């Protein structure tokens, strides 16, 4: 009988991709997927460290799952991802039901450790159960993520990060930047396309810094756009520093590339951006937005912002609110600052209490919500192509999908199915959601 595996994924899309990579390695070794914890023999927890809360919730979840070990003591708990790299052997002390801790550069050793030479889990051999550390050569060449989604797929093109933003743990848990060979990326996209994937999202922490033997990010986008069957190309997460003229030109001229850019602002104060070591000023940032919106006012723009960064004064925060008003983002991911072990900013004493940080976050969210609503209302009367994702949870005759600019649209249809591209006339905004009617029916 084959072993069943279950993967619980936390954090960003890079972890989603890695979970699919691990799934494919396991299936090559005869394992089968399951969603049922009563049936799973191998439990993977692919974790995130970006904020304290992310680690806390993963640890709580793992402890809760211990219940299944009581009934089936042979099952294994394997922690992978950023928290595995961050805490290493400390994790085994902190959560007593963990068998293995495997960092993001060591996934190739999973089959070895689980199937070929499994370490008998004993209290004293902690070192043998913890595989962490970086390998600058490890790009998982020749390993491809399992395609579980019917029409959309992530493809990692860059691992690690060479920036050292003063608040960020990612460089400490993912190591230095490395790029996957363009040929390997293209091979993966071609295979995905043959399996019916029409939307590709390229991933990296500073994805637009990609370069590999003379191929830069813009060149790679063009090559991917030429692969038959690929209709939508997205990417996460670009860094404002690498929006070159050449890249912006390609983004605006290649029809397969979606008119949506996620550009993380982090703060609207130059003094804070400097302290964060972001390497751009608010003006530089606004000029990039202007290049997109100047040509296409409907261009989708989303961002990430941190409220209550260490040393953020009332005035700095007011400048963030002003920048958000000026930028008119379609949506934003907003977070309260969380000090992270090992980072430069964690060495500084915070002047804001947790309540003050949460209060700033709430004001920011409220402002952005009003802008999101305003931007959504501007879509009324327009016709948009929607990639259909799933039936609506409220009404099975209604479908949910996204515009190229990354806006959610709900519409009624008797013939639509997931993966279809449907032209819709946008009629109204209900709550925050756009509603439309198919124009072809
Ligand atoms: N590479 C991306 C960001 C990856 S982390 C970039 O450079 O933009 C995703 C987001 O988490 C960040 O954009 C930031 O807004 C947030 N974040 C990272 N570290 C954080 C911290 N210590 N506290 C609060 N938010 C944080
Ligand atoms: Fe973190 Fe900065 Fe790297 Fe983004 S660019 S992953 S925020 S260090
Ligand atoms: Fe979290 Fe690691 Fe991604 S820290 S945000 S899962 S790279």
Image (cartoon, helix red, strand yellow):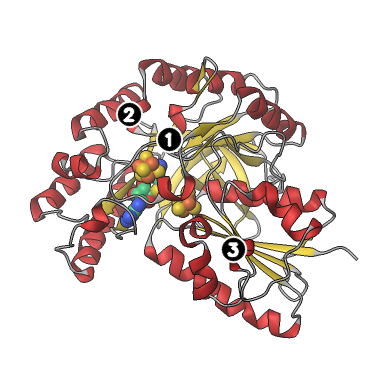
Q: Position of residue 223 (x, y in %)?
A: 60, 19
Give the alpha-carbon distance from disc 3 to disc 2, as whole Å: 40 Å
Q: Can residue 377 be seen in this view?
A: no
Would you place residue 348 above or below residue 95 in this image? above
Q: Out of 220 and 370, give the one closest to the viewer.
A: 220
The residue labelled by disc 3 is 127
Q: In which quarter of the image is the C terminus?
A: top right
Badge 1 residue CB within 8 Å of ligand 2? yes
The residue labelled by disc 1 is 206
Q: Which residue lies furthest to the front in this view?
A: 124
Q: Which residue is drawn at 56% across and 41% down?
A: 135
Mark positioned earlier in the residue sequence (1 or 2): 1
- In this picture, residue 44 sits left or right of residue 217: right
Q: Which residue is drawn at 74% across and 48% down?
A: 24
Q: Position of residue 137 (x, y in %)?
A: 58, 34
User: How many marks overall?
Assistant: 3
User: Is label 2 in a helix, a strand or a loop?
Assistant: helix
Q: Residue furthest bottom?
A: 70
Mark positioned earlier in the residue sequence (3 or 2): 3
Give the alpha-carbon distance from disc 1 to disc 2, as whole Å: 9 Å
User: Is label 1 in a helix, a strand or a loop?
Assistant: loop
Q: Residues within 10 Å of mark 1 (few under 14, many from 20)?
A: many
In front: label 3 or label 2: 3
């Amino acid at each position: 009988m084959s072993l069943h595996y279950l993967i619980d994924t936390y954090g960003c899309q890079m972890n989603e991709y890695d979970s699919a990579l691990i799934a494919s390695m396991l299936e090559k070794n005869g394992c089968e997927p399951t969603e049922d914890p009563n049936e799973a023999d191998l439990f993977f927890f692919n974790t995130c460290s970006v904020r304290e809360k992310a680690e806390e919730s993963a640890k709580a979840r793992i402890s809760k799952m211990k219940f299944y070990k009581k009934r089936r003591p042979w099952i294994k708990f394997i922690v992978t991802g950023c928290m595995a790299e961050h805490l290493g052997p400390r994790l085994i002390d902190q959560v007593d039901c963990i068998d293995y801790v495997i960092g993001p550069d060591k996934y190739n050793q999973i089959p070895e450790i689980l199937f070929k030479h499994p370490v008998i889990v004993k209290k004293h051999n902690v070192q043998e159960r913890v595989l962490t550390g970086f390998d600058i050569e490890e790009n998982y060449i020749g390993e491809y993520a399992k395609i579980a989604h019917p029409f959309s797929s992530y493809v990692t093109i860059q691992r690690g990060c060479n920036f050292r933003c003063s608040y960020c743990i990612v460089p400490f848990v993912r190591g230095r930047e490395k790029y996957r060979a363009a040929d390997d990326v293209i091979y993966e996209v071609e295979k995905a396309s043959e399996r019916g994937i029409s939307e590709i999202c390229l991933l990296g922490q500073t994805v637009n810094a990609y370069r590999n033997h003379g191929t830069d990010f813009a060149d790679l986008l063009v090559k991917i756009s030429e692969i038959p069957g690929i209709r939508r190309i997205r990417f996460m997460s670009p860094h404002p520093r690498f929006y070159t003229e050449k890249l912006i030109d390609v983004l605006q001229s290649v029809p397969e590339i979606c008119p949506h850019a996620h550009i993380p602002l982090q703060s609207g104060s130059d003094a804070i951006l400097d302290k964060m070591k972001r390497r751009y000023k608010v003006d530089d940032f606004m000029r990039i937005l202007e290049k997109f919106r100047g040509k296409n006012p409907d261009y989708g723009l989303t961002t990430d912002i941190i409220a209550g960064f260490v040393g953020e004064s009332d005035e700095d925060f007011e400048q963030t609110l002003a920048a958000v008003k000026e930028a008119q983002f379609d949506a934003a991911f907003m977070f309260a600052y969380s000090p992270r072990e090992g980072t430069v900013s964690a060495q500084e004493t915070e002047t804001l209490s947790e309540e003050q940080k949460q209060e700033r976050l709430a004001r920011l969210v409220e402002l952005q919500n009003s802008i999101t609503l305003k931007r959504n209302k501007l879509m009324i009367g327009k016709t948009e192509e929607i990639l259909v994702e799933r039936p609506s949870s409220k009404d099975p005759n209604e479908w949910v999908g996204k515009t190229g600019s990354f806006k959610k649209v709900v519409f009624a249809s008797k013939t639509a199915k997931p993966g279809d591209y449907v032209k819709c006339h946008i009629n109204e905004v209900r709550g925050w959601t756009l509603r439309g009617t198919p124009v072809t029916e």
